[in-house]
Image (spheres, rainbow, N blue to C red):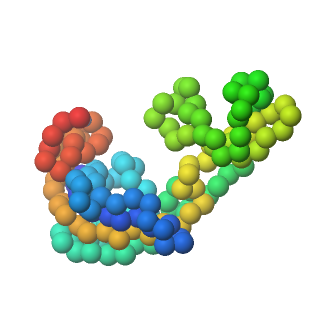
Amino acid sequence: MSRVVSFHYTLTDSKGEKLDSSFGHEPLTFMEGVGQIIPGLEKELATLKVKEKKKVVVPAKDAYGLRDNKFLVEVPRANFPPDVKLGDEFQAKDDEHGHPLKVIKLSETHVTLDANHPLAGMDLTFDVEMIEIREATKEEVAHGHAHGAHGHHH
Ligand code: ZN
């Protein structure tokens, strides 16, 4: 049986800087075994009971992966606005939901974009609190994802 798990989390990077938190909002809800959340976190959450809290440190390779030079893309400068500068971010046209690509190098003729996930290469710390664990509904199993803590549809 698949389980649907809801939990609260605060995410900090390896420097202790807070990146994100669900506390004060809806908990994050996911279905186990389908890759909805990063594997290193899913594995640890599977050991928690409702109301249990834990600090989970996920190494980069089990989080958003290591940085990879194959995700650096060189594009002719003519494709960019004339005032393009280092650190500018662009959304790839064919990938509206993806993360933005960041300008990391400029030459006379080319712009180098970094398409690595912004959290790639980072060890992440999650302070988690387990909120709810339930069986997945038939509909959720059929769709391959959770439909939220209260079963609302997307
Ligand atoms: Zn669905």
Measured as percent of width and height from the top left, residue 114 is found at: 66, 44
Residue 112 left/right relative to 126: right
- Viewer-nearest residue: 71 or 15: 15
Q: Is residue 75 above or below residue 66?
A: above
Residue at far right of view: 108
Measured as percent of width and height from the top left, residue 26 is found at: 22, 53
Which residue is drawn at the image coordinates 44% and 60% (left, top)? 19
- Viewer-nearest residue: 3 or 50: 50
Which residue is drawn at the image coordinates 34% and 52% (left, top)? 33
Which residue is drawn at the image coordinates 34% and 60% (left, top)? 21
Q: Is residue 31 above or below residue 90?
A: below
Location of the C terminus by quadrant is: top left
- Viewer-nearest residue: 13 or 154: 13
- Viewer-nearest residue: 116 or 111: 111
Q: Is residue 134 above or below residue 70?
A: below
Q: How many marks?
A: 0
Picture quarter containing residue 151? top left
Residue 69 left/right relative to 15: right
Residue 43 in view in this figure: no
Residue 108 in view in this figure: yes
Measured as percent of width and height from the top left, residue 125 is found at: 44, 69
Residue at far left of view: 150
Picture quarter containing residue 74? top right
Q: Is residue 2 above or below residue 94?
A: below
Q: Quadrant of ligand 1?
A: top left
